[in-house]
Amino acid sequence: METIDPSIEAVVPLANWLSVLAGYVASGHPDLTNRQMALLLLVYLDPGPHTVRGIAARLHVSKPVVTRILNALSALGYVRRQKDMSDLRNIFVVRTPEGLAFIEAFAGLIKRLEGYGRQPESKD
């Protein structure tokens, strides 16, 4: 089987991502699916308030999918649901200290590996 040359410019970001994922796997943090990670990053990187309907629209998934993701992330303590006191039919998804710690640790993995696999810029 032929392997991909890791020095090819288009492959460098994938090599970087592999390093981040390997660091994440080794970190001992719970394994998150891509959907769980996307929802978590959305909640922590975008200003709120975040609703199930808004998250579903942003991630292009159904509201039941968002509910299942929230169940998993809530069980880990990474997010929590909070009632909208002005409209009790609405539920906001809010950040937690545990979720912030996870996001900061994951960002640290990325930052620590910055530059890994990058090709030196030519000085033409």
Image: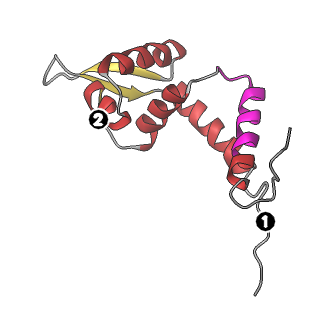
| Residue shown at 78% from the left, 54% from the top | 116
Q: Which mark is residue 49?
A: 2
Give the amino acid type for the residue marked by disc 2 in the picture.
Pro
Residue 50 spot, x, y in % from top left? 31, 32
Q: Is residue 28 in view from this perspective?
A: yes
Q: Quadrant of residue 59?
A: top left
Seen in the image, is 92 located left or right of residue 71?
Answer: left
Q: Is residue 85 left or right of residue 59?
A: left
- Secondary structure of the residue carrying numbered label 1: loop
Q: Residue at x 64, y 37 (%)?
A: 106
| Separation (CA) of disc 2 from disc 1 | 40 Å
Magenta region = 17-30
User: Is 10 drawn above or below residue 104 in the view shown?
Assistant: below
Which x, y percent locates residue 100? Answer: 53, 33
Name of the residue lying farthest toward the bottom? 124
Q: Is residue 97 visible?
A: no
Quadrant, the C terminus: bottom right
Label 1: which residue? 119
Q: Who is closer to the viewer here, 68 or 49? A: 68
Q: Which mark is residue 35?
A: none
Which amino acid is tagged 1?
Gln
The residue at the point 13 percent across, 25 percent down is: 86
Q: Is 113 rendered above or below residue 23?
A: below
Count all numbered tags in the image, as a single digit: 2
Residue found at x 44% / y 23%: 79
Q: Position of residue 11 (x, y in %)?
A: 72, 53
Seen as rendered, the residue at the extreme front is 1
